[in-house]
Each structure stands twice: as C-alpha cells, then as structure tokens.
Image (cartoon, helix red, strand yellow):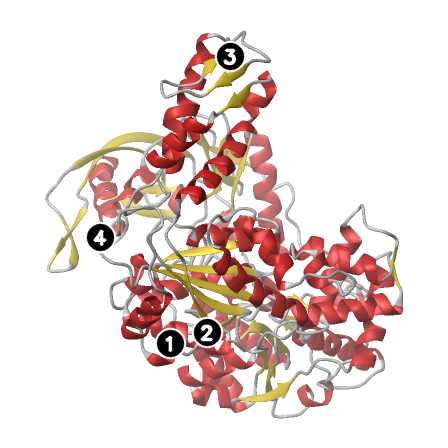
Amino acid sequence: MSRDEGSLRVYYVHHPSGRCSGYLLRKRANLGDPPPPAAFGTHEGEVLEALETELQDRLVRGQEDLERYLWSETFATQRIDVVIHPATMVDRHPVIGRRELPLRMTYAWSRTESGAYRVMLPRYDWWILLQDLETAAAAIGTAVTGALLGADPRDLYDFRAEGEERVGAHAPRLIKAPRADRNREPDPPPALDSVADDWLRAAARKKLPRLVGAPGLNLAPAVRRWPRPSLLLVGDPGVGKTTEVQHLARALLRERRGGAGDVPGLWATSSERLLAGMVYVGMWQERLLKVVDEASRLGEVLYVDKLLPLMRPQSSGSSLLDLLLPAMRRGDLSVIAECNPTELSHARRLDPEAVDVFRRQHVAPPQPQVLQQMLQAYAERGGRTFHPRALRRLVTLQGAYRRDRSFPGKAFRFLDWAARAPDLPARFDPADVERAFARRTGLPLEIISDAQTASAATIASRLREEVIGQDAACDAAAAVLAAFKAGLNPPDRPIGTLLFVGPTGVGKTQLAKRIAGYLFGSADRLVRVDMSEYAVRGAAQRLLRTGRGVRSLATQVRDEPLSVVLLDEIEKAAPDVYDLMLGVLGEGRLTDDQGRMIDFRQTLVLATSNLGVEDRSPVGFDAERDAHDYGRAVREHFRPELVGRIDRIVPFRSLREEDLLRIVDLELVCIRAREGLVRRGIVLEVPPAMRALLAREGHDPVYGARPLRRVLETRLVTPLAVHLAKHPQVRDTTFVATPEGPVPRA
C-alpha cells in the first residue's frame, strides 16, 4: 500500500455471508468518547459511503475532530494464533485461570515515524505500541485475556477472525465545515441534541402532534421564573400529562416569536435515551453531566417523561436523578417529569427528599362538556363523523369497561383505532359505536348494549353449552356476569371473585375457559397462573416481574386489563402470595416491581381448589360432596380476610354417567369437525355401546374426565389416521367406531 498523506483508514471485514463491515481507524480516544464510526453493507463502497456520512454528521454537530481520523502511515494486516487464559472464579472473584485456549485473530499494524510498531484491533478501538512485531501475539493475548476478566466467557468468540480483513486508504472527499449563513438556525447544543428533541423547534416546524382543547395548566410562567423550578405532573394514565408539556412548548414558542426575553427552550428525552449505548463505566454519567451543564448554562427546560425510571439505580449504584438533583436544588436546571398517584407513592417511599425537590402539578380529566367538544374535534380530524349521542355513548362505554385509563386519552385511542379500521361506517350513531366497541374489546353486544337483554338464565345457558354437569356452577358465574352487565358490580374491585372447589377433572378449568370465550370471544383472554409454581416463600415477587419477554401476572393484565384471571390450585401458593391477593381482590390493584399500578377492576378473578375433597374419591359416577364441607375446608385453610374477599365459593360435584356421555358427544363434535375428515368427506359414527365404553374408559376416580381426550385419540383418531394414511384414496365414506377401531361401513 502506498503512503497517502492525510487520508482516512478503513478496516474492512468480509464476512462468510458475503457482506462487509467497516471501521474507521482513529489515532486516539478520550474518556467517554463514543466508538468510532462503523458500518455494515453489501460491499466496500456502500460501507465507505455510510462511514463518511456518519463522520460528517459528527463533525457538523461538533462531536468529532477530523484530525484524529487522518493518517499518513501505511497499514497492513497480519493473522496470528494467540493463547487466551479464560477467567475463572476464586472465592467469588474473577481471576485469570490456568486453562489455555487457542484463538486465531487478525490485527492491523503500521510503522510509526519513531520506528515503533502500532498494533491495532480496529473492531474494538484498541491499539498498542510495540518495539518489535514478534511480541505482538503475546501482547494481544494478554490484552484479550484482561478484557475478558469478569465478562461472559462467550465474548471470547467475538475476537476470532472471520473472513478477509484488510485496511483501505481513502481521501476524505466530503469533509468541509459548512459556510456561515446568517439565516441559518444556530447549531443546537451537542449534548442535548444527541439525547433529546427540541420541542420548540419541532413546534415551529409543525412536527408536534396536533392538539385539541385548551391546556388545563398554565406552566409557562412557572418555567420562566428564576431560580428555575422543577415540575412533577401527577395524574392518571391517559389524562393528558404529556399533552400539557406539548401545550407548554407551543406557549413558549409564541412568547419567543412575540419578542419576549428570557424564554427557555424545552427539550424532551427519557431515561432510556439518556442511557442508550452507554456500556462502559462512567459513560452515562459523563454524558448526563454534559447535558446538565448545557441545559443549566442556556437556561433550558428538560422534560424527562416518567419519574420512576429516573430514580432506578444503575449498575454503579447511583441513579439518573442523583446527577440531576444538585443543579435542580440550586435552581440552575428545570426538570419536568410525570407520574400517576400510585407511582408518586412509590417514589416517595424510595426517596422522599428527591420527590420534594419537584413542585407538584395535578392534571385532572376534562369536564364532561369540554370532553364532548374535544372528542368531536378529534373525531373529525380522523375522517369519521360521530353523532353527539354516539360520542356520549362512547364515553359511557369507556367509563364502564375501560377503567384502567382516564379521559380523554382512552377515548382518543378508540377514535384512532376507528379511523384506521377500513370497514367501519363514515358516520357513527350509538348502535355503530356499540358494535365497534364490542369488536375492539371482545365483549359481546348482549353485555354492553342496553338494547339487548342478557339475563342470568340466558348467560347460564350459554355457559352450559360447553360445561357439562355443573349447572349450579354455571348459574353462580352467570349471576356475576349479569351484575356486570347491569353495572352493579363493585366499582373498586374486580368484576367478581369466585372460588371453584371440587374434585379434579369435573370442569372447573373448562368453565373458566368458557367464561373467557363468552366474555371476550376467545379462551386466549384467560390469564392462567399455576399457583403450585409459587409455593415457596418469596415466590410472590415473580408475579410482579416486568421486562422484555416476561409474562407474569402483572404484565399480562397490564397488556390486557379486560380479561379472566384463573388462579389454578390456589391452596398450594405460599402465604406471601395470599398477602398479594388481598390487594387484588380488595382494591382491584397490584403494584409491579417498577412501582406501576396494574388495574384489576376489569378482570374476573377465578380460583380453583381441591380443598374438601377426600384423598380417595368415592367409587361410582354419582358420588358427591356436600357443599358445606367444601366451605368449611376453605375457611380452615385460608385466612379470614382472604375468604372475606371471595364473592362466592362455588362447589363442583362429581360427574355422573349421563354427564360423561354428554361430554363424549361434545368431544366427538370437535373430532368430526377436524379439517382432515371434512376435506375427505369422512363421517364418523359412534354406536351407543361404544359411547358407553368411551365414557367408562375416559373416567378416572381421581382425575375425573381428564383421561377422556386421550382415550378418544387412542380409540378413534389414531386408528382412523393410520387407515387414511394407508388408503389415501378413501373419500366420502362413513366409519363406524368399534372397540378395535373405526372401520368402514359395509
């Protein structure tokens, strides 16, 4: 490679997939610097263009010095085999171990003017000066071993060579400082601009969302005072806290355009953005201190969204708020955060002095007349027309069935959905709103519509369609749902709390699934929790877990507040789980591990138990337990305060012979509807004697009717599948079930 004065050096890695990575080499790095520009593309030209674009962007923002990327040295690459000593643990501390692992790597090198050799691992922005290249393998092996100390052992493979790796020299064709322009907006402060959005600039360019209605708070005078106050907006989800900050941005822009002096800017960010990409010790602290310095020096307001993530300790032990508080207390920095009342209580428990630095502003829902005007304006923007009575009906439905959020936010969400749905009418009357609301929530029209009746008897008959032999239990569940339709369920508790008690395999879980299917159109809306998995003390915290990929009770109900919650085998749970359930059943609320409130007031809570059932069930199909025995067993096992929060203890009886025959018929309907039989025109007949045989074999004294589906698969489905696989030409044939398996009718 020829020497090239003042040009860029790009380290190219050609992957086995045929694509290419590129890394700009730089001469030195300062503490807290981001990694040098890197890119990934289909070929070297595409990678080079992306690298130059990224470098140009950093230069314009004042985040880079071009001189660090201009080289006069000639680079070459060398592949070597090094020996790595992976870390091991000694007395709970990571130490360099004795075990040796060979690793093939590629490094770049150049000869400096002093005669030393510069050895670089460009993919990791690491370099060292050596007197002789013969020591490169040992030096790199030692460096990699040290870098892996305390890291995941699998990180070792990140250092291995992939495909061809080389260094290319390129003249910086782009890079010139932009000419001064009197009409050009001043460059934004680099630290703030890297992690936050300038909402005054966005408002000037009409990039903020269009707002309806007037602000409920007048925040502009507050943020213009000196010393700068910090504000905490407190209100329920959906009430419009973020909207108040957007109103503030527009108000400040109007004052600035009107020539008012000392008008602060407003920058919007979040804890996630402040921490994004900060992987090394001290990086996020340095970034945040730069943000604080710029915002304080320029008198800008920093909107940080949610309060609780700001207070969450990071790996260093300190939180984002810890670094903001000194400037906030001095009045140099104005911070606006938001939370709901539950989160405020949690925050005060974490650090009451930090919360007191904020001046609290309570955001209330709009008055009914104002809400009606806001909804009308919002609906017209979405291209739909709503009759005033239709909007009033929407408010009634949202108030009754979506208590997890407040107005106007929850109504705006519905209107947004209606504007996107292609098959909804252009003009809505109240009946159209009811049909659309039923479609969006899954609730049946007969529950939400005043024009349709749904008595307890009607609902019970719907439940009995798939639940056999438990008429009394269906009646008890139907009574709760009828009260839900009438709006007579407790407003600050779940829709209802029922404890299903009885033997195994008699339909307790099946009734829970049927209720979910009736209420929401699908058994998938059943949130099922196996309480035997929470039998160890301390396991209750797992019900509250949140995070990416976590499916806990808290996350499932937060994602879908309208649901049926099934606490299966509740008697097996640990006592601290019962403590948790007291809040759910008594107040309809649960606080997750991040301090956020989960609303259970739209859930129907069901629990199952085998308490009161003898260890050895009586022989015979019509053996039953007295309901009084179940109630006594429940009261003896659970604390009185938990039993007192259960609306009804629902006994389930053992199944009789005629019940099992009806269950067989119900399962046969599902088997006959399977796609493979319908497509071939196969009809399956089951004579009475065979029905009785299936009922007897499908019942177990301990497990009830649970074995029935396995028996049907073994006796009917599997032999029929074998026959059809052996004779694929069979079509439009009737098969008769026999003890030996289904056979074609003669």
Circle 2 packing at 10 Å, graded few (<14), some (14-19), many (20+), is: many
Residue 699 appearing in the image: yes
Dot placed on the residue nearer the N-terminal end, 1 or 2: 2
Foreground: disc 1 or disc 4: 4
Q: Nearer the viewer, residue 649 or 594?
A: 649
Q: Circle 1 sits on which residue? A: 642
Q: Which residue is at 28% across, 62% downward?
A: 572
Q: Amino acid at mark 1?
A: Leu
Distance between the Cα atoms at labels 1 and 2?
A: 8 Å
Residue, x 33% and y 60% (percent of image)? Answer: 625
Observer-side mark, 3 or 1, equals: 3
Secondary structure state at the residue bearing disc 1: helix
Residue 556 numbered tag: none
> Judging from the image, what secondary structure is the residue with disc 3 in?
loop
Residue 468: % across, % down: 48, 48
Q: Is residue 259 above or below residue 105?
A: below
Contact? badges 1 and 2 (CB < 8 Å)? yes
Q: Of the residues tagged 4 and 2, which is closer to the observer?
A: 4
Distance between mark 1 and mark 4 Cα atoms: 28 Å
Question: Distance of mark 3 from mark 1, alpha carbons?
Answer: 59 Å
Q: Which mark is residue 616?
A: 4
Q: CA distance from mark 4 to mark 2?
A: 33 Å
First of labels 1, 4 by sequence position: 4
Q: Is residue 116 visible?
A: no
Whichever of callouts 3 and 1 sits on the residue coming sooner in the sequence is 1
Instruction: Kindly report which numbered mark, 3 or 2, lies closer to the viewer in this rendering.
Output: 3
- Mark 2 belongs to which amino acid? Leu
Direction from residue 294 to residue 724 in the image, left or right: left
State the image coordinates of residue 620 (x, y, percent, origin top left).
Answer: 30, 46
Q: Amino acid at mark 3?
A: Arg
